[in-house]
Image (cartoon, rainbow, N blue to C red):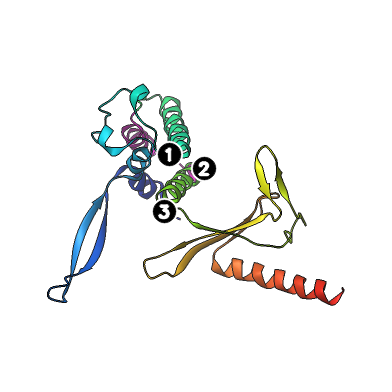
């Protein structure tokens, strides 16, 4: 897992992406470098159209902006509020600029975090990085049509919150070569998680065995 400094960097500093392009006229390939905004800024840009923001500050009053993504708004507001709380706990003044506040918190606390406290903050930051990347590049989602092997549940949810007949959802991402990666399966009832390709494949083998066993007893 990344360090706290690396995770704070992902959230608050620009990153660079190398893009390969083929020139049709010559058939040659060339590489260009693209600078990407910090993840926190990319998440905020999903809340309001980019034309209404000048980067770190908004050009219009919050009440007059057009929302782009309500879920992103909720998640950004929750993350920004938590960062503000961290600053106040460290006796820092929260400025309501999530990027500036997180960097100030990191600079103030990086020398003293240790043990369980360091593990807590590292997990929280890693969760934010993953959540924002889910917003920026939503995963593919597949419902596995079988009861959960752990809790045995065959349905979840209700008419108010929604739901499905089957509780296990598989999520994965597809890269530019159309190769899946980052596989995660989760039971939406008991919360058990199968993380990584090996664990998901083991889950598939277990469910196939159960299907064969169920078929032989009918």
State the image coordinates of residue 47 (x, y, percent, origin top left): 38, 36
Which corner quadrant holds the C terminus?
bottom right
- Label 2 environment density (alpha carbons within 10 Å; few <14, some 14–19, many ≥20): few
Answer above or below: position of 93 versus 157: above
What residue lies at 35% left-to-right and 35% top-to-bottom?
48
Dot 3 falls on a residue whose secondary structure is loop
Is 43 left or right of 124, judged from the image as shown? left
- Label 3 environment density (alpha carbons within 10 Å; few <14, some 14–19, many ≥20): few
Answer above or below: position of 69 versus 133: above
Label disc, if present, on residue 69 of the rendered structure: 1
Q: Say which quarter of the image contains residue 208.
A: bottom right
Q: Name the N-terminal-most of marks 1 and 2.
A: 1
> Which residue, given by chain and number where applicable, does mark 3 sit on?
137
State the image coordinates of residue 119 (x, y, percent, origin top left): 51, 46
Mark 3, mark 2: which one is toward the viewer? 3
Magenta-tinted stretch: 97-119
> Which residue, given by chain and number where applicable, does mark 2 sit on?
120
Asked whether 43 or 143 is in front, the reply is 143
What residue lies at 70% left-to-right and 50% top-to-bottom?
190
- Residue 50 is a magenta residue: no
- Residue 112 is a magenta residue: yes
């Amino acid at each position: 897992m990344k360090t706290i400094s690396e995770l704070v960097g992902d959230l608050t500093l620009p990153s660079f992406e190398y893009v390969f392009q083929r020139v049709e006229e010559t058939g040659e390939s060339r590489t260009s470098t693209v600078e990407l905004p910090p993840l926190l800024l990319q998440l905020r840009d999903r809340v309001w159209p980019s034309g209404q923001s000048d980067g770190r500050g908004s050009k219009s009053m919050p009440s007059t902006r057009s929302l782009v993504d309500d879920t992103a708004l909720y998640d950004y507001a929750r993350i920004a509020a938590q960062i503000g709380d961290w600053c106040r706990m460290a006796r820092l003044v929260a400025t309501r600029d999530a990027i500036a506040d997180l960097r100030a918190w990191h600079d103030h606390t990086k020398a003293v975090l240790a043990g369980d406290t360091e593990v807590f903050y590292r997990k929280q930051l890693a969760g934010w990085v993953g959540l924002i990347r889910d917003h920026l590049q939503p995963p593919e989602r597949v419902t596995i049509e079988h009861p959960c092997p752990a809790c045995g549940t065959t349905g979840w949810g209700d008419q108010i919150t929604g739901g499905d007949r089957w509780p296990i959802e598989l999520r994965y991402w597809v890269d530019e070569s159309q190769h899946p990666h980052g596989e995660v399966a989760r039971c939406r009832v008991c919360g058990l998680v199968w993380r990584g390709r090996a664990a998901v494949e083991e889950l598939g083998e277990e469910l196939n065995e159960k299907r064969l066993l169920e078929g032989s007893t009918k």
